[in-house]
Structures are given as C-alpha cells and as structure tokens.
Amino acid sequence: MMMRKLAARTALAGTMISLASAAMAQTAPAAPAAPAAPAAPAAPASVSLPSPGMAGPLAFQSVPWSLDTGPLGKWYVDGVLSGLGLAQSNQVPADKNATADLSNGTVIVQKIDGLVQFYAQLGAYSIPALGTQYDKLLDSAHAEGNLYSAVPMAFLKLQPTDSFSIQAGKLATLIGAESTFTFENMNIERGLLWNQEPAVSRGVQANYTQGPVTVNLSLNDGYYSNKFNWVSGLVTWTIDATDTLAFDGGANISKTSLNTWATPLVQNNSSIFNIIYTYNNAPWVITPYVQYSHVSSNSTIGIPSSVNTYGGAILATYTIDDHWSMGGRAEYLTSDGNKSTGVSTLYGPGSGAFSLTLTPTYKINQFFVRGEVSYTDVTSLTDGYGFGTNYNKSDQFRGLLEAGVVF
C-alpha cells in the first residue's frame, strides 16, 4: 500500500511540474528577432546605345554616363580619346614616312527614348585609309576642314512607334560594311572598298522594322556634296541569332560637278551596291561581302567615259580571351577603262588593288592598345597614280599603333 501511494504522489508531482513548465513557456516574453540585413543595392541597368555602329572589338561601357534633364529626358554621354602612330613605305611626296597623331578626341551625347530623340558626335578625328595619303589630308589637323567638320555626325530622330522612325541631319551612310571612324571598326585603317563608298551624308532617313527584317531608306547628298540628289537604301534580314544578310545600294539621280576631298567627282556621280553577310558566334565575327559600282559618262561635268568597279572583301575578328582579340581583312578591287582615255576610280584607269590587314587588340576595362600591319599591292598601275616620290610604285606597307580609352 505504501508503495502505491508513493508512486501516485510521484506521478502527481511530475504532472504538476509539466503543467507549470508549460504555463511559464506561454507567459515568457519572446526573444527579440534579429534585425534584417539591409538589401543590396540594385546593379545599374545596362543600356544598349543604337549609335554609333560598333563592329568590335572596342565597345562603350555597358552602363554609360547619363544626365537626367527633367522634362527633356535622360541624355547619355560617352566618347573616345585615342592616339596613333603610323609608319609606311613608299609614301607620296605630300606624306611622311612616319607620324604620330590624335585619332579620336570625340564626345557623343544622345537621347534614345521618347518621341523626340537625338544624336550628336563632336570633336577631333582622323581617318587613316589604306593606300591613301594621311598627312595634311586625313590626319586630325586637316580632316575636319577637308571632310565633315568638328561635328561629323548629328541628327534629330522622331520615333512615333517601336517599329518606325524618321531622322534628319548628318547621317552615317547606309552603304558598306565598314564605318568611318577608327573606334567603330575591327581594323584601324579603312579599306579599299570603303574608299569607294560615301561615309557621312546630310539628309533624311526613314527606318521600319517588321519581325526579322529592317528597311532603311534615305534621300541625301551622297558624298557630302550639299546637293540632295542621292537615294540610298538598306534591307537587313536577321536570319537567326548568329546570321545576318544585308543588301544596300545608292545612286546619284542627277549629276553633280563638285570635286573636293570629301566629294570626289567620279564616285559622287556613281551608283554603288553591296551584298553583306555576317556570322556572329563567339569567338568569331566574320563578314564577307561583295561590291559593284558604276559611273556613267558625262563630258559636261568632266567624266569622258563610263567605268565599273568590282570588289570583294572578308572582315573577321577572333576573340582569344577577355583581353585579347585578332582582327583581319582581305580584299580585292578592280576597275575597267582604257589607260589613255578612261576614268580612274582607283590607281588609274583599268587598275586593281589587293590588300591584307592584321590588327591584334588588347583591352583592359575601357583602355585599349592595338597594333596593325597592312599591305596594299596595285595591279595594272598607271604611272602618276601610284605610291612613292614619283607616284610609280605599286605597293605599300604600313604599320600602326593606336591606344586610348573608350568611356
């Protein structure tokens, strides 16, 4: 009996202890929660600027500088500061065998959204081109006066819908696979085929996109003649994520007698066409294209006979790693015409030319250094149109070094 009573008392005591513990747990204040960690600031959104065209390997910052102007919207600012050194064989008398120069001192301001947009490119530049005199012609001290002024490109753009826009001002040409300024291209120098094409034109341009097809149509002044008698167009088909096919063309629909460095008489009175394919799949970007141009005879403006040019080129860039890449270009251009009575579009009537260019590039953040070696060889040269002190040499080697920052 005593054992039963003791067991009962023990069980009752355990139950009371359990109840008391539960009551204390219900009435005890909760421990304060640990403060929440502050949220990490959101990374700035990257912005894809539609202009200028950049074929690589150089690129602007993914988050460009911006300025909120209130009712005038957000303006983006970027630019390029770079210099180059050039050495060459068989220079013409007006040129130097070696020189150093500013290649870009450029600031770009643009607005890319809303109904009213704009683009303005300002500053100094040089335009080295294969087989063409550089000093006192295309160097930074003379390019502005000889070519497109200190504001080489500027336009106002109206974008009423996502698929349609219209722009007016100083526009990049719709023709060709290479752009005008060194920082836009795979190579430092422009090529032989580029030298047959307009570069910057004043005019108006309409743009329309439907699915994978974009159509651009422009009325402009061709080779910067200030006479609005050129019509040019570009149709681009984005086949898939890696392949693009484009057809461009332009023609002078009347005649222009002006003849300057920016407006060469023969080319400004021509029609010109390109078919351009681009394969873009890392580490490769490969762009082969073909070109045809025609100039009709017109003795009243100094073109005694017609002439045609036929050309082809391959541009390519191979990205080795985050810092290194290699660019290259091979091209051939030929023209017809009688040596004694014909018209020259190259190195004399009936001449042709072949070129090879290699351009390795090293980048770290927004800084870059790139070298270049190029060779130009002329076939069927007419004396007086070639290289060297007597304009009778048929080939030229060049070496270039360009360094700077893209910001």
Image (spheres, rainbow, N blue to C red):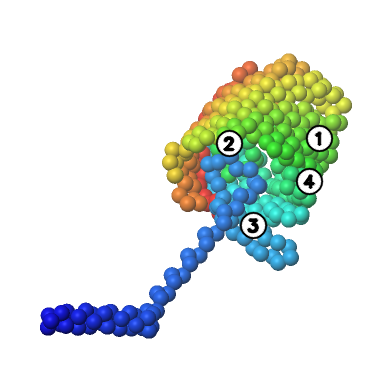
Q: Nearer the viewer, residue 107 or 146?
A: 107
Counting residues from the start of the chain, the first of labels 3 and 2 encountered is 3
> Label 3 amino acid?
Tyr
Residues under labels 1 and 2: Cα distance? 33 Å
Counting residues from the start of the chain, the first of labels 1 and 2 encountered is 1
Residue 217 horizontal/vertical position (percent): 78, 37
Residue pointed to by mark 3: 76
Residue pointed to by mark 1: 230
Counting residues from the start of the chain, the first of labels 4 and 1 encountered is 4
Q: Is residue 390 visible?
A: no
Residues under labels 4 and 1: Cα distance? 17 Å
CB under 8 Å between callouts 4 and 1? no
Q: In the image, what residue occupies the spot 67% across and 59% down?
A: 75
**Callout 3 crowding tier (Cα within 10 Å): few <14, some 14–19, many ≥20:** some
> Label 1 amino acid?
Trp
Instruction: Give the farthest residue toward the left.
Output: 2
